[in-house]
Image (cartoon, rainbow, N blue to C red):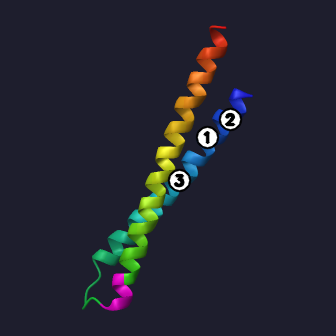
């Protein structure tokens, strides 16, 4: 059971890492665009920042999940 949870957590972590890399590339392209900043560009930057915050929250949830999984594993080992 613990192995399937760990594999699931690793899979979610990989998806989050790929999402972070995509968002980071988009943010780099937006901030390096030439021209005047319009309301649409400002809204896009705000949405990218919000998406990055969501991805960071996902990283934190994965870390907490792995810590809890390790704790339960150690508890079961020493029972």
In screen coordinates, is 5 left or right of 23? right
Q: Secondary structure at mark 3?
A: helix
Q: Are marks 1 and 3 in contact (CB under 8 Å)?
A: no
Within-10-Å neighbours for mark 1: few <14, some 14–19, many 20+ = some
Which residue ends up furthest to the top in the rendered image? Answer: 78
Quarter of the image holding residue 53? bottom left
Horizontal and vertical percent for residue 45? 36, 76
Residue 41 lies within the magenta run? yes
The magenta stretch is 38-42
Residue 77 lies within the magenta run? no
Q: Quadrant of the C terminus?
A: top right
Q: Are marks 3 and 2 in contact (CB under 8 Å)?
A: no
Residue at 46% x, 66% y: name it. 51
Horizontal and vertical percent for residue 37? 27, 88
Q: Are marks 1 and 2 in contact (CB under 8 Å)?
A: yes
Within-10-Å neighbours for mark 2: few <14, some 14–19, many 20+ = few
Residue at 62% x, 15% y: name it. 75
User: What distance separates the C-alpha of mark 1 from that of mark 2?
Assistant: 6 Å
Circle nearer the N terminus (3, 2) = 2
The residue carrying mark 3 is 16
Which numbered dot is residue 5? Answer: 2
Circle nearer the N terminus (1, 3) = 1
Query: Does residue 6 sit above or below 62 in this rendering?
Result: above
The residue carrying mark 1 is 9
Quarter of the image holding residue 36? bottom left
């Amino acid at each position: 059971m613990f192995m399937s949870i760990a594999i699931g957590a690793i899979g979610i972590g990989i998806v989050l890492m790929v999402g972070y890399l995509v968002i980071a590339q988009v943010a780099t392209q937006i901030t390096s665009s030439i021209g005047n900043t319009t309301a649409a560009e400002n809204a896009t930057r705000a949405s990218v920042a919000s998406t990055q915050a969501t991805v960071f929250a996902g990283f934190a949830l994965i870390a907490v999940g792995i810590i809890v999984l390790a704790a339960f594993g150690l508890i079961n080992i020493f029972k």
